[in-house]
Image (spheres, rainbow, N blue to C red):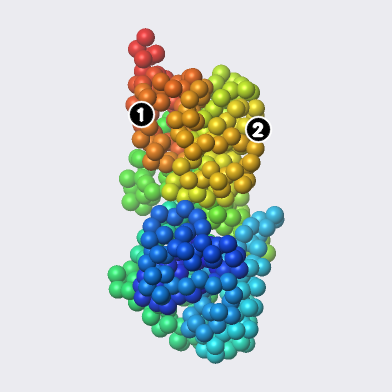
Amino acid sequence: MIGCGYLGAVHAAALASLGHDVIGVDSDGDKIALLETGAAPFFEPGLEPLLVQGLASGRLRFRRRLEEAAAAEVHFVTVGTPQRPDGSADLSAVEAVVAGLAGVIRTGALVVGKSTVPVGTAARLADVIVAAGGRLAWNPEFLREGLAVQDSLHPDRLVYGLAEGDASSEEVLDAVYAEVLREGMPKVVTDLATAELVKVSANAFLATKISFINAMAEIAEATGADVTQLADAIGVDARIGRRFLGAGVGFGGGCLPKDIRGFVARAEELGTGRSVAFLREIDAINLRRRERVVELARESLGGSLAGRRIAALGLAFKPDSDDVRDSPALAVAGMLADAGARVVAHDPAAVDTARLRRPDLDYTRDLGQALVGAEAVVVLTEWGSYRELDPTEAGSVVAGRRLVDARNCLDREAWAAAGWEVRSPGRPARLPLVARAG
Ligand code: UGA
C-alpha cells in the first residue's frame, strides 16, 4: 500500500484483517513510526484496534522505502492528489510513485490505482507500468471518513477498471477481495476511463445533491418556507431519497470540494467544459452558505459582531473526524473572528488540526468553557455531544440565549422551549416559547 493517509492506512489495515500480507509504505517517517506502534496518525473510529490486530498477527508492516515492498504481487497506489491553485489535481505524488514502482516491481506484478485522478491519467500510467513488465488497473475507493473501517471491510460496490486486453487482473483483484465479494455486493468490471469517472462523478453527484437542497434553503429564506420539512417531503420519494439532503453550512473535506473543481478543470482541458459547468454553481452555492451562517450570527446579535463573545461549536468538516481540510466549520469560525467577534472554538477531535491552519483563533477542548459567557452559540459540526446538550443547562451558563444551528441538527423546539432564540439556515427563526407566551 503506497501512501498511508486516510485511504491507504485504513485499506492496509483492512486487507491485513482479511488475511493478506500487507506492507504499508509512506515517505513520512513520523507517520510510519506512529503506525508501527498501532497508533492512527488521524482520528478514525475503529482504526487503531484493526492496526494493533494486524501488527500483532505479523500480517501488517509499515516501511518508509518503496524498495521494501518490491516483492509484492499487488501494489496499491493510495497517495494524495491535492488541489492546485487553479483547481486542477496535483498528480506529482501519483506520478512519482508509479515511476518508482516501475523501477522495482517484479515482472507480472499488478499495480492498482486507488487515488482520485483526472480521467485519462490511468491510461498514461499504464504505459509506464507495462514498459516495466507489470500491469495496471484502477480500483476507485468510496470510503467515507468517520466510517472508513466499515466502508473498507464492507464496501457497497467494487469497481475494477482494466486496460484493454487485460484478461488476468480481474482474477487477481477477485483474490484480494475474496472475503468482501462473498457478501455479494455489486462488482462492476469496466475500462480505465470509466473507473476513473465513476469515482469523480459519484462525488460530483453527492455535492450536487447537497447544493441543491442548500439552493432550496436560499429560496426558503426568501419566502418563509422551511427547508427541512421540504427535504423530508421530497426525500420520501425513493427516486430522490432523503440522504444528502441535509441543508446547512454546506460540504467540505478533502474530497467533495477538490473533486468537483478538479472535474471542471479536466473537462475544460478535454474541451467538454460546458458539460460540467454547473459544478461551478454547485461550488458557489456551497461557499455562499458559509456567509449566510455568519449573517445569521450577526442578525441574532442585533446587527454587529464586533467585540461579541461567540462559542463556535465544531471545527471538523463532519463529525467523527479531525479533518479540517476545506472545513465549512473552521471557515465560519475564522470569518466570525475576522469580523471582530471574540470566538472561542470547540471541537471534540479537531482542535489540533484546526490550530495548524488558524493559529490565531482561541480554542478549547472543554465544551463548558466554550459556552460560559457566550452571547451566541453557533453549532457548525453535528457532533453527538452537541446534539446531546441540555438547552436549560447550557442556557444557565451563557450570557445570551442565542443559537445558530448551522447544521440543522438540534431539536429547535426543545431549545426554544428553554428560552433560546434559534436561527438556522433555510428555516424561519424560532423565538423563545417563554417570550412568545409572554
Ligand atoms: C466523500 C464521499 O461520501 C465518499 O463516498 C468518498 O469515498 C470520499 O468523499 C472520497 O472521495 O474519498 P467524505 O469526504 O468522508 O466522503 O464525506 P461525506 O460524508 O461525503 O460528507 C462530505 C461533506 O458533505 C461534509 O462536510 C458533510 O457535512 C457534508 N454534508 C453531507 C452536508 O452538508 N449535507 C448532507 O446532507 C450530507
- Pick the residue in front: 83 or 245: 83
- Pick the residue in front: 229 or 160: 160
Q: Is residue 301 left or right of residue 48?
A: right
Q: Position of residue 58 (x, y in %)?
A: 40, 75
The answer as to whether callout 2 falls within 8 Å of ligand 1 is: no
Residue 267 visible somewhere in the drawing: no
- Tally of numbered discs: 2
User: How many other residues sit within 10 Å of disc 2, few (<14), some (14-19) or many (≥20)?
Assistant: some
Q: CA distance from mark 2 to mark 1?
A: 30 Å
Does dot 1 land on a helix, a strand or a loop?
A: loop
Q: Position of residue 141 (x, y in %)?
A: 47, 65
Image quarter (top left, top right, bottom left or bottom right) of the C terminus = top left
User: How many other residues sit within 10 Å of disc 1, few (<14), some (14-19) or many (≥20)?
Assistant: few
- Pick the residue in front: 32 or 303: 32
- Disc 1 residue type? Asp
Q: Residue furthest top?
A: 438
Residue 390 badge:
1
Q: Residue furthest right?
A: 86
- Pick the residue in front: 128 or 1: 1
The answer as to whether callout 1 falls within 8 Å of ligand 1 is: no
- Determine the residue positioned at 61% across, 68% down: 27
Q: Is residue 344 left or right of residue 247?
A: right
Q: Which residue is mark 2?
A: 338
Q: Position of residue 222 (x, y in %)?
A: 51, 29
Q: Position of residue 312 (x, y in %)?
A: 52, 33
Residue 243 visible somewhere in the drawing: yes
Does dot 2 land on a helix, a strand or a loop?
A: helix
Residue 177 badge:
none
- Disc 2 residue type? Asp
